[in-house]
């Protein structure tokens, strides 16, 4: 049975000594640790005598260290070697709380945050260039030696990232075309120009909404998937194992995803075009009583294939951007789940931002070319 921990004060020879006795263990402490801390609070020049302690474990050693904290002249006398060793081990393991730093003034904190953001932006740009260098090296190797291309994962990823996305892409663009048609009909009917709703639907769907909606949906669907898959492999050190075995992770992981999106986004864009035109055609048929044959004939005569090819020309660029952002964020995942979640979120946000920015650049370019 544990003997309760106890202590007494002994003043002999002009020195005040605290003599500890009993079992200074987790079972024997009871309230001794708190009483010892209160007794030693504010007292200097007090020595500790641990020679009469029966047993001492880490809990007791920690209580003694906490009670003696802050007294410069505290000493330990006539203690057994094992007790001294235990106190040393526990003392080294105790984590000292960092001092609370004074927060800088508001303007200094703002400038510091801006500076950190600039350094982070520069580091992110450097990491992007490194990623593109590795990717171009992998592409070059595959072009020189086509047998290095991994067709099995490319087909599998094309099915998951492309074919499985057909229902959501078609449904979304169908309703986008219907909404554009409904808005155009309500606005143009006041001017007696409701027939121009056909041109409005054709140009908006063929030129912008087909590729824009497809790319945004794939940014949320495929970019996040790529970042999560590669990031989980990075966390489990599977990528390190691949490098040890001599397998280039850019050839095995990044390049197949890159090729899969390049193959599937043009197909999805074409399906989105058909679905958007179908949604607009249905609305103008029901609201304006414009027959489908007249709708299609007017699309051919007054819209033409130019707008269709303009929309399709953006598809490869969007595919490369989505795949590159998703895979790069996956490669930047650390060893914790928080890093994985943060990188997956960054992949979606960066991909959507890049899509809108690239679409604006294409719009300005084609406007300058008068196309």
Image (cartoon, rainbow, N blue to C red):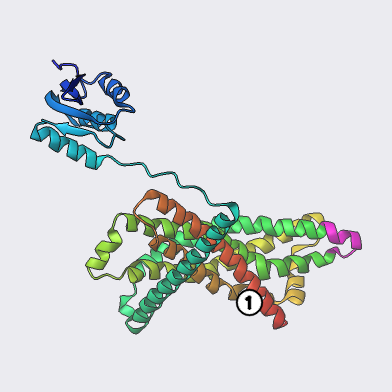
Q: Residue at x 53, y 59 (%)?
A: 112
Is 371 drawn above or below residue 341 in the view shown? Answer: below
> Which residue is at the front of the view, 312 or 242?
242
- The secondary element bearing badge 1 is classed as helix
Q: How many marks?
A: 1
> The C terminus appears in which quarter of the rendering?
bottom right
For the residue pair 6 and 240, the one nearer the viewer reads as 6
Residue 73 is at least partly visible in this image: yes
- 52 relative to 313 in the view: left or right: left
* Residue 210 % position (x, y): 63, 65
Is residue 357 shown in magenta? no
**Looking at the rendering, which quadrant does residue 289 occupy?**
bottom right
Magenta highlight range: 186-194
Q: Residue furthest left?
A: 81
Residue 358: image quadrant is bottom right
Q: Is residue 71 left or right of residue 101?
A: left
For disc 1, the neighbor class at 10 Å (few under 14, some 14 to 19, many from 20) is few
Magenta stretch, main secondary structure class:
helix
Q: Quadrant of residue 329?
A: bottom left
Residue of label 1? 309
The reply to whether residue 211 is visible in this rendering is: no
Instruction: Give how far across and how far down residue 93 sits, in percent.
Output: 24, 41
x and y percentages locating residue 276 in the rendered image: 66, 62
Where residue 2 sits in the image (x, y, percent)? 15, 17
């Amino acid at each position: 049975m544990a003997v309760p921990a106890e202590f007494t004060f002994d003043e002999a020879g002009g020195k005040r000594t605290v003599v500890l006795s009993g079992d200074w263990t987790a079972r024997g402490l009871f309230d001794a640790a708190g009483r010892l801390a209160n007794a030693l609070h504010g007292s200097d020049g007090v020595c500790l005598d641990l020679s009469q302690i029966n047993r001492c474990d880490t809990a007791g050693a920690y209580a003694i260290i906490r009670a003696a904290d802050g007294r410069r002249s505290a000493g330990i006398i006539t203690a057994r070697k094992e007790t001294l060793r235990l106190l040393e081990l526990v003392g080294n393991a105790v984590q000292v709380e960092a001092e609370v730093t004074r927060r800088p003034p508001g303007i200094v904190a703002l400038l510091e945050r801006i500076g950190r953001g600039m350094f982070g932006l520069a580091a992110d740009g450097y990491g992007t260039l490194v990623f593109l260098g590795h990717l171009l090296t992998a592409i070059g190797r595959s072009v020189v030696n086509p047998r290095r291309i991994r067709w099995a994962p490319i087909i599998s990823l094309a099915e998951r990232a492309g074919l499985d996305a057909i229902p959501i892409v078609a449904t979304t663009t169908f309703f986008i075309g219907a909404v554009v048609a409904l808005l155009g009909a309500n606005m143009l009917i006041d001017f007696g120009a409701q027939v121009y709703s056909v041109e409005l639907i054709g140009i908006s769907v063929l030129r912008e909404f087909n590729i824009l909606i497809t790319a945004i949906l794939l940014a949320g669907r495929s970019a996040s998937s790529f970042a999560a898959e590669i990031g989980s492999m990075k966390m489990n050190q599977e990528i390190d194992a691949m490098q040890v075995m001599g397998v280039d992770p850019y050839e095995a992981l990044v390049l197949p995803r890159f090729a899969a999106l390049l193959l599937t986004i043009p197909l999805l864009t074409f399906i989105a075009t058909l679905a958007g035109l179908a949604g607009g055609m249905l609305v103008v048929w029901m609201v304006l009583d414009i027959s489908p044959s007249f709708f299609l004939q007017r699309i051919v005569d007054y819209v033409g294939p130019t707008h269709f090819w303009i929309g399709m020309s953006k598809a490869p660029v969007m595919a490369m951007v989505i795949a590159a952002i998703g895979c790069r964020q996956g490669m930047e995942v650390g060893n914790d789940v928080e890093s994985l979640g943060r990188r997956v979120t960054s992949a979606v946000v960066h991909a959507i931002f890049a899509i809108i920015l690239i679409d604006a650049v294409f719009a300005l370019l084609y406007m300058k070319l008068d196309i």
